[in-house]
Amino acid sequence: MAKEAQLQQLQQIEDKLRRLISRYTDVQQKLVQAQEEIKLLEGIVEEKELQIKNFQNQDNIVKIVDAIAGNTANSTELKLKLNEYIREIDKCIAYLQD
């Protein structure tokens, strides 16, 4: 009878170990999924930050144009400045895409 009790106890331990391994595997899969989702969300955040910077740059350009547009004598200077800003923005965008 003692062997039978030991076998039964061993079977219970084995069942518990199988359940533990199963739970561990599930948790590992959930962790991998969570890490993938984090990477995806980080990419989205970076994209949104870039969009915000672009909007801020556009807003700055609009403010500059509004400030200088009142004086038509500076229109050539304004065009040169805008072209300079646009080139800088293009450089920044190209750098961020790399």
Image (cartoon, rainbow, N blue to C red):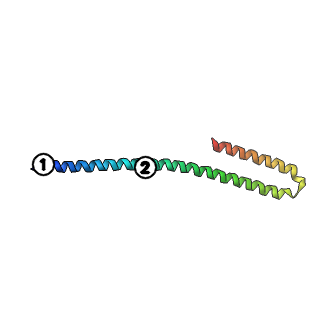
In what element is the residue under mark 2? helix
Q: How many marks?
A: 2
Residue drawn at 66 percent across, 43 percent down? 95
Residue 46: x and y in percent read 60, 50
Is residue 29 rendered to the left or right of residue 54?
Answer: left
Q: Between tags 1 and 2, which lies in front?
A: 1
- Callouts 1 and 2 close, C-beta under 8 Å: no
Quadrant where the C terminus is found in the figure = top right
As drawn, the label of residue 14 is none
Is residue 80 rendered to the left or right of residue 57?
Answer: right
Q: Among all residues in the image, which is located at the extreme top?
A: 98
Amino acid marked by disc 1: Glu
Is residue 43 rendered to the left or right of residue 74?
Answer: left
Q: Which residue is mark 2?
A: 31
Residue 78: x and y in percent read 83, 51
In what element is the residue under mark 1? helix
Residue drawn at 66 percent across, 51 percent down? 51
Task: Name the foreground residue: 42 vs 13.
Answer: 13
Residue drawn at 67 percent across, 42 percent down? 94
Q: Among all residues in the image, which is located at the extreme right?
A: 73
Dividing the picture into quarters, in which one does residue 69 lie? bottom right
Marks 1 and 2, the one that precedes in the sequence: 1
Task: Name the foreground residue: 79 vs 47.
Answer: 47
Residue drawn at 79 percent across, 49 percent down? 82
Q: Which residue is mark 1?
A: 4
Q: Residues within 10 Å of mark 1 (few under 14, many from 20)?
A: few
Estimate the spatial distance between the alpha carbons at disc 1 and disc 2, rounded to whole Å. 40 Å
Amino acid marked by disc 2: Leu
Task: Name the foreground residue: 83 vs 55.
Answer: 55
Q: Residues within 10 Å of mark 2 (few under 14, many from 20)?
A: few
Is residue 78 rendered to the left or right of residue 56?
Answer: right
Residue 28: x and y in percent read 39, 48
